[in-house]
Image: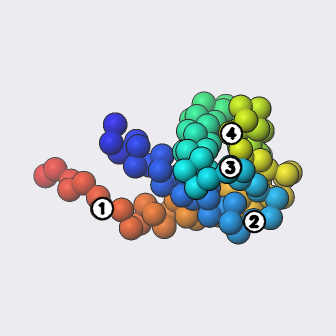
Amino acid sequence: MMRFLVRLVLTALALWLATAIVGGIHLYGDSVLERFLSLVLVALVFTLVNTFVKPIIMAVGCALYVLTLGLFGLVVNALMFWLTGWVSEQLSLGFFVDGFWPAFWGAIIVSLAMWVMDLLSPRKPVAE
């Protein structure tokens, strides 16, 4: 459970980084605490979208992954990010994505930030 919460906060941090870098990704809130809680909730939505919707899209678009040598994955990630923005807007979480291109760049930034955070995080020792 603790690992999930840490991962959720790290995802929220990556989402914040995307809002800071990419124009077209907006985070609203009156206070720092309100924006932080909003980011944590958006990170939860992002996690749910990537857990339940993304595998379905990947299965349906399997041929496009092969045909484009995996580049279609960038489009799928952008669509999942855009869907997260739409769901967050519907739930009034204070997170909004203007369109496909901000979602595309935001998804790349979140992916890179999560990759770097994974590299920096300590690993559990492997049992021998």
Q: Secondary structure at mark 1?
A: loop
| Image quarter of residue 108 | bottom right
Q: Are marks 2 and 3 in contact (CB under 8 Å)?
A: no
Q: Secondary structure at mark 4?
A: loop
Task: State the image coordinates of residue 49 (x, y, percent, origin top left).
Answer: 63, 36
Q: Are marks 4 and 1 in contact (CB under 8 Å)?
A: no
In the image, 1 versus 31, the foreground residue is 31
Is tag 4's residue or tag 1's residue first in the polypeptide sequence?
4
Q: Marks 1 and 3, Cα distance to the nearest angstrom? A: 33 Å
Residue corresponding to mark 3: 29
Residue corresponding to mark 2: 22
Q: Marks 3 and 4, Cα distance to the nearest angstrom? A: 9 Å
Camera-near label (1 vs 3) is 3
Which residue lies most toward the left here? 128
Q: Residues within 10 Å of mark 3 (few under 14, many from 20)?
A: some
| Image quarter of residue 59 | top right
Is tag 2's residue or tag 4's residue first in the polypeptide sequence?
2
Is tag 1's residue or tag 3's residue first in the polypeptide sequence?
3
Q: Secondary structure at mark 3?
A: loop
Residue corresponding to mark 1: 122
Residue corresponding to mark 4: 93
Q: Quadrant of the N terminus?
A: top left
Q: Marks 2 and 3, Cα distance to the nearest angstrom? A: 18 Å
Q: Are marks 2 and 4 in contact (CB under 8 Å)?
A: no
